[in-house]
Image: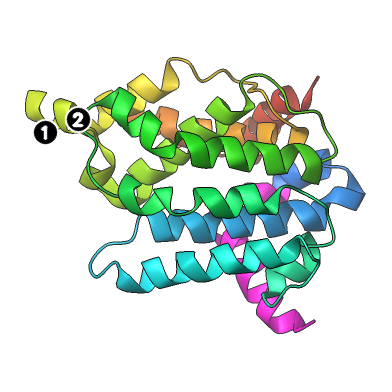
Amino acid sequence: MNSSALDSFLDKWRARWPEWSVAEPFVAPDLRARTVAWFALLQEFDDMLNTSGDPLPADAKLAWWGEELRSWASQRSRHPLGRVLEPVRAPWAQLADALPSLVDARAVAPDAPAAERALGDYANAVAGVEAVLFEDRLRSGAGHAVLTQTLAQRLFDAGVAGIPRSLLEQDATGAAQRWASMLLKPWRRRVAGPRPRRIWAALARARLQAQANGKPIEATPVRTLLRVWWAARG
């Protein structure tokens, strides 16, 4: 394994989520490396979903990842993240099948239901992988938890492109805050899914809450610890 190549992907994710240094002890020690590798992979998919400018490079990466994920079923990997993730017999092919939907999901959705539909198959595929990856059962609502967090990340990364058109037409100035508030309504402080997802979702929810309030996030170690402790329970 090229450890420097692997570390570059892991470090990029950690740089975007510095709160994880407080959260990570709540993940079982034998799952920590796998957790960060998986979240780093999802960040790559988020980047391809929320790309701006010429989409062709991102489209080519998505196609490559589809082939790569299918090869993991035979335990053959080329990507550094695959050396960590591929040994787990997760439903990689189903995730590969869902990746093309990210291309269509880049378009501004006409309304909130359309935004959810565009990413529904992808979110369910991610939840299916996580159940196996984190040695948990597939819980009811796990796919929706992934969906909401993906839409929240899209709002952060893509800005106006991540806001449904119906909200922009009402009032473009406050559309981002209104969309953040809509996403928060069904988002519980402890979501369905395995513990690593619940913890990461708690960190993402805090960021979205700050955006809905129009204030900077208060991500002090103590506040982060309390959020993570609650999310990790159960």
Residue 10, horizontal then vertical, whole percent: 66, 66
Q: Tell me the magenta residue range.
A: 1-21
Determine if the magenta segment contains residue 20: yes
Secondary structure, magenta segment, majority class: helix
Q: Measured from the top left, where is residue 66 in percent x and y?
A: 55, 63
Please rate how many residues cluster around mark 1, counting C-alpha atoms within 10 Å: few if below 14, some from 14 to 19, many from 20. some
Residue at the image position 41 percent from the left and 48 percent from the top: 101
Query: Would you place residue 85 above or below residue 150 in this image?
Result: below
Using residue 193 as the reference point, say whether residue 145 is left or right of it.
left
Task: Give me the residue at 40% from left, 50% from top.
Answer: 102
Q: Is residue 58 above or below residue 88?
A: below
**Which of 54 and 95 lies nearest the eye of the viewer?**
95
Residue type at numbered disc 1: Ala
Asked whether, in this view, residue 204 is left or right of residue 116, the answer is right
Image quarter of the N terminus: bottom right
Residue occupying image coordinates x 42% and y 33%:
208
Q: Residue at x 85, y 49 (%)?
A: 31
In the rendered image, the vertical position of residue 13 relative to residue 167, given as above or below: below
Can residue 163 be seen here? yes
Element under disc 2: helix
Q: Nearer the viewer, residue 89 or 133?
A: 89
What count of labels does the image hold?
Answer: 2
Asked if the stretch drawn in magenta spans residue 9, the answer is yes
Question: Quick check: marks 1 and 2 in contact, CB under 8 Å?
Answer: yes
Residue on which the image places disc 2: 175
